[in-house]
Amino acid sequence: MLGRLTCAARGKPFAGDDIEKALARPLWADGSARPVFDTVKPGEPVCIVVSDHTRKTAADRILPPLVGGLEQKGCSA
């Protein structure tokens, strides 16, 4: 083995409604905090890309509120 990559910044797992709160008030690059769903127009097509099973991303917890919010905005699969 030549080396090992590690991450010094390990975050705590999302708890309770943390995901919904993060979608409602994310921090954007421009410093604003508008909800994720305000960036999509009603009925606008959306593409969601997730990691495969080899990455621990909690997609099973993130996707339901994300897709639900997009459906409420009028987006469909």
Image: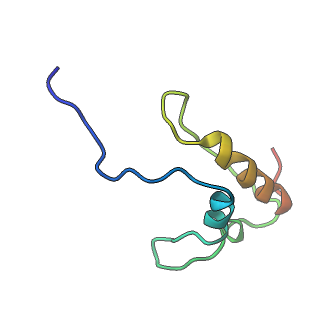
Which corner quadrant of the image does residue 1 belong to? top left
The quarter in which the C terminus is drawn is: top right
Residue 65 can be seen, yes or no: yes
Task: Pinpoint residue 23: horizontal percent, then vertical percent.
Answer: 65, 64
Residue at figure coordinates x 38%, y 50% from the top left: 10
Residue 57, above or below 43: above
Using residue 39 as the reference point, say whether residue 8 is left or right of it: left
Residue at figure coordinates x 74%, y 54% from the top left: 65
Which corner quadrant of the image does residue 53 belong to? top right
Residue at figure coordinates x 80%, y 54% from the top left: 68
Residue 47 can be seen, yes or no: no
Using residue 13 as the reference point, say whether residue 42 is left or right of it: right
Residue 54, above or below 32: above
The foreground one among 16 and 57 is: 16
Residue at figure coordinates x 70%, y 71% from the top left: 38
Task: Pinpoint residue 15: horizontal percent, then vertical percent.
Answer: 61, 55
Task: Pinpoint residue 64: horizontal percent, then vertical percent.
Answer: 74, 47
